[in-house]
């Protein structure tokens, strides 16, 4: 038997509930969730669609790390929770509208490109592989302190457009506030992505592009590196 601990959220509040399922009857976490719903508790709610790691709808947090439940091989004692920084509708099912609106806020400010506005010979295949599972968004620690942060997958999409569009001025302009400079570059988003996309690397590239266009980290002037002002303020010119 396998024991699974699932964080459930219902009208009366949130609580951890343990379930035991036959090890021979399940392989992936998703199969275990279906087994629980079919044989133990029909009220367990979770998302799934393609069951093959393509749609991204079944993403959850397992033992503190984001996983696609249709791909994750279940293990005894696993702790399963809904994605972080998302409104929980019930149990493991979340509403993704807040995170999606961050990406749309960028895309809505960019005119859809005509063919003659595209750069030639640019490969943005990796960024295009995003399945919108929201794993990178859930893994990002910045959102714990700044809920207005644009988020990793929106910035990866922004980087993709800077690579394919002839003009990237509007894109760069709209990723400065609550965007690239708020990222801590911890790399959790890159680790969480099931598609091998590197949001951290894309954000670094966006910082470099922004610097070339005259932008800089607005927080840099307030940073204290342990030496105060290094005595510069005592000089008279």
Image: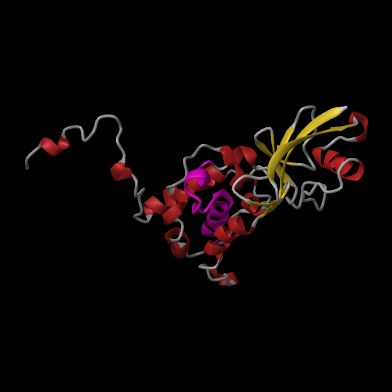
- Displayed quadrant of residue 81: top right
Residue occupying the point 66% across, 36% down: 65
> What percent of the width, then of the height, locates residue 35?
89, 41
Is 8 in front, or is 192? 8
Instruction: Specify whether 21 is left or right of 62.
Output: right
Q: Extreme left residue here?
A: 237
Measured along the vertical axis of the image, is residue 148 above or below residue 145?
below
Q: Residue furthest front?
A: 12
Front-most of residues 161 and 9: 9
Q: Could you tell me residue 163's position as x and y percent?
A: 54, 56
Q: Give the main secondary structure of the magenta stretch.
A: helix
Picture quadrant where residue 173 is located: bottom left
Q: Residue 146: where, in percent of width, then height?
A: 47, 48
Question: In the rendered view of the protein, which quadrant contains the N terminus?
Answer: top right
- Relative to 150, residue 2 above or below: above
Q: So how many labels did they put on this image? A: 0
Looking at this view, is 23 or 166 the one in front? 23
Residue at 65%, 55% in the rendered image: 96
Q: Which residues are magenta?
A: 141-165
Magenta stretch contains residue 156: yes
> Quick check: 215 left or right of 48?
left
Q: How is the image coloured?
A: secondary structure
Q: What residue is rendered at 10% in x and 37% in y?
A: 235
Any magenta on residue 174? Answer: no
Instruction: Give how far across and how far down residue 117 sits, in percent.
Output: 54, 69
Where residue 41 sits, quadrant-wise, is top right
Image quarter in which the C terminus is found: top left
Q: Is residue 81 visible?
A: no
Q: For this view, does 143 lie left or right of residue 93?
A: left
Q: Is residue 171 visible?
A: yes
Residue drawn at x 78%, y 40% is 71
């Amino acid at each position: 038997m396998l024991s699974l601990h699932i964080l459930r959220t219902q009208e009366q509040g949130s609580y951890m509930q343990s379930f035991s399922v036959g090890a021979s009857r399940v392989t992936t976490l998703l199969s275990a969730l279906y087994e629980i719903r079919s044989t133990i508790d029909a009220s367990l709610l979770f998302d799934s669609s393609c069951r093959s790691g393509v749609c991204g709808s079944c993403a959850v947090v397992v033992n503190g790390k984001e996983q696609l439940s249709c791909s994750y091989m279940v293990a005894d004692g696993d702790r399963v929770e809904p994605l972080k920084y998302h409104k929980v509708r019930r149990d493991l099912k979340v509403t993704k509208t807040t995170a999606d609106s961050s990406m749309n806020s960028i895309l809505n400010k960019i005119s859809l490109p005509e063919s003659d506005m595209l750069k030639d010979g640019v490969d943005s295949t990796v960024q295009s592989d995003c399945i919108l599972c929201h794993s990178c968004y859930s893994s990002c620690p910045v959102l714990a302190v700044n809920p207005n942060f644009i988020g990793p997958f929106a910035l990866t999409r922004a980087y993709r457009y800077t690579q394919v569009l002839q003009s990237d001025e509007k894109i760069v302009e709209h990723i400065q506030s609550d965007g690239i400079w708020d990222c801590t570059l911890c790399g959790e988003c890159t680790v969480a992505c099931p598609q091998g996309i590197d949001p951290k690397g894309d954000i670094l590239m966006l910082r470099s592009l922004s610097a070339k266009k005259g932008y800089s980290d607005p927080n840099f002037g307030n940073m204290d590196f342990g030496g105060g002002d290094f005595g510069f303020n005592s000089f008279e010119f």
